Image: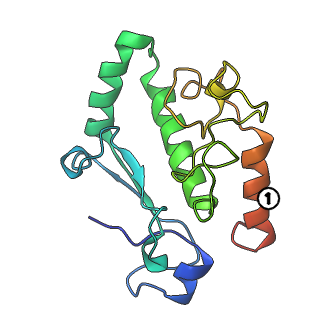
C-alpha cells in the first residue's frame, strides 16, 4: 500500500522518487484498509517518525461504508456527508504537523487530534464533539450542518501556510 505521500519539509528534503513533493497525495480505493487494521477505512500516515513516510492518505470506500453502517445504530444517517467530513479530516492531518512534542490534553494529542478544541479545560463536552479534528468520530463532527473547525486547528493550518507548505 502506498505510504509515502505527505508534503512536509522533511519529506521534501528526503523526497521519495515516485511521488511529487509539490502536492498532497490522496488515494481513493475500494477496499484494503480494514485488512491492514484500519477500522474506519480512512487513514493518513502522517504520524510516521520517518520524514519520507509522512505524505498522503487513503479512503477505502467499501471499508468506510462498513464502518458507517455500524455507526447508524448511534445516529449516523448521512453517508455522503460522513465521507466528505472523513476526507476533510484526513486532509487536515496532512496539512498540520502537530504530532511532535504533543502533550495529551493540551492542544493536539499524539494522534494529531484535539481533545479540548474549545480550550475550556473540559474534555469531550458538546462543543468539543463538533470539531473536525476531535479525538473521536461523532455524529456532530461528521455531518456538515454541525461540523466545525476551531481556532486551534485554524492556527495550525495558518502556521503551515506561513512556512509555504500550503498555497
Question: In which quadrant is the C terminus drawn?
Answer: bottom right
Left or right position of 19 against 38: right
Q: Nearer the viewer, residue 9 or 111?
A: 111
Q: Residue at x 72, y 47 (%)?
A: 153
Q: State the SS at label 1.
A: helix
Q: Position of residue 46 (x, y in %)?
A: 49, 62
Q: Nearer the viewer, residue 83 or 10?
A: 10
- Tell me: residue 7, above or below residue 75: below
Give the answer, above or below, for where 30 lies relative to 4.
Answer: above
Closer to us: 66 or 137:
137
User: Callout 1: few (<14), some (14-19), or many (20+) C-alpha neighbours within 10 Å?
Assistant: some
The image quarter containing residue 127 is: top right
Q: Residue at 41% of width from left, 12% of height from top?
A: 74
Tell me the quarter of the picture where residue 61 sits: top left
Residue 93 percent across, percent down from the top left: 56, 54
Q: Position of residue 55 (x, y in %)?
A: 48, 69
Q: Which residue is mark 1?
A: 158
Judge left or right: residue 65 versus residue 162.
left
List x then y, in percent, for residue 90: 51, 49
Image-quadrant location for residue 40: top left
Quarter of the image for the N terminus: give it: bottom left
Q: Residue at x 70, y 31 (%)?
A: 148
Which residue sits at x=44%, y=76%? Answer: 50
The colour scheme used to paint the residues is rainbow
Amino acid at each position: 500500500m502506498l505510504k509515502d505521500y505527505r508534503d512536509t519539509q522533511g519529506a521534501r528534503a528526503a523526497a521519495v522518487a515516485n511521488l511529487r513533493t509539490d502536492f498532497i497525495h490522496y488515494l481513493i480505493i475500494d477496499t484494503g484498509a480494514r485488512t491492514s487494521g484500519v477500522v474506519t477505512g480512512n487513514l493518513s500516515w502522517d504520524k510516521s517518525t520517518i520524514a519520507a513516510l509522512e505524505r498522503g492518505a487513503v479512503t477505502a470506500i467499501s471499508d468506510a461504508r462498513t464502518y458507517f453502517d455500524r455507526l447508524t445504530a448511534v445516529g449516523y444517517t448521512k453517508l455522503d456527508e460522513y465521507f466528505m467530513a472523513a476526507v476533510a479530516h484526513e486532509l487536515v492531518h496532512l496539512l498540520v504537523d502537530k504530532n511532535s512534542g504533543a502533550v495529551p490534553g493540551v492542544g493536539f494529542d499524539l494522534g494529531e487530534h484535539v481533545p479540548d478544541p474549545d480550550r475550556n479545560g473540559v474534555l469531550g463536552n458538546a462543543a468539543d464533539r463538533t470539531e473536525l479534528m476531535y479525538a473521536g468520530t461523532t455524529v456532530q463532527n461528521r455531518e456538515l450542518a454541525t461540523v466545525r473547525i476551531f481556532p486551534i486547528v485554524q492556527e495550525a493550518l495558518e502556521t503551515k501556510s506561513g512556512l509555504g507548505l500550503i498555497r
